[in-house]
Amino acid sequence: MSIHHRGVKPALTSDSEALTKAPPAPAYLSTQAKAEWKRIMPQLIRRAIICRADLAGVENYCTMIGTIRQIEKQRSLAGGLIDVKLFGVLNRAAQTARQLAAEYGLTPTSRARIGSNAADDDDDDNPLAIT
């Protein structure tokens, strides 16, 4: 009998080679993307879930967030008018950012998966616990 886990993401855990200090934002990132880098890096470092190999994915996430913010700024400056072509770019960037955010524990659901790895040490209070 086999158990299929299609669509079920594995729980995030601390990485044995996790970064202990946030690297500076890459120089080529836009101002908005650098701001996102600076906002999320402390969380990722504190949770010890990213290593050097993950930085390209984090860069991509920040780039997508920067793109979304840039398009929204342009839309705002245009009096709120929606450019159909830019809306398509915004939509794809938002989808990619959401997917990458989930990969790195930047969404409520993915953070809950991280928290689910915590040791359950309240067995002393459970009258049904087998010891």
Image (cartoon, rainbow, N blue to C red):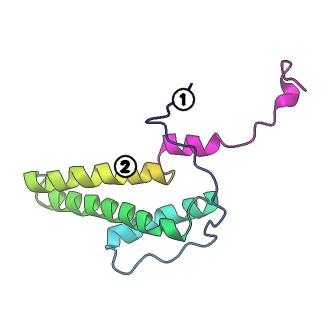
Position of the N terminus by quadrant:
top right
112 up-or-down from 16: above or below: above
Q: Position of residue 25 (x, y in %)?
A: 44, 75
Task: Tell me what residue is drawn at x 88 percent, y 29 percent.
Answer: 124
Q: Secondary structure at mark 2?
A: helix
| Residue at horizontal 59 percent and vertical 64 percent from the top | 45
Dot 1 crowding, Cα within 10 Å, few <14, some 14–19, many 20+: few
Residue at point 57%, 40% (across, down):
112
Q: Is residue 60 visible?
A: yes
Outermost residue, top side: 128
Q: Are marks 2 and 1 in contact (CB under 8 Å)?
A: no
Q: Earlier in the sequence, mark 2 or mark 1?
A: 1
Residue labelled with disc 1? 3
28 in the magenta segment = no
**Residue type at the position of mark 1:** Ile
Q: Quadrant of the C terminus?
A: top right
Q: Amino acid at mark 2?
A: Arg
Tell me which segment is drawn in magenta.
106-131
Quarter of image, res 36: bottom left
| Residue on which the image places disc 2 | 98
| Dot 2 alpha-carbon crowd within 10 angstroms: few under 14, some 14 to 19, many 20 or more | some
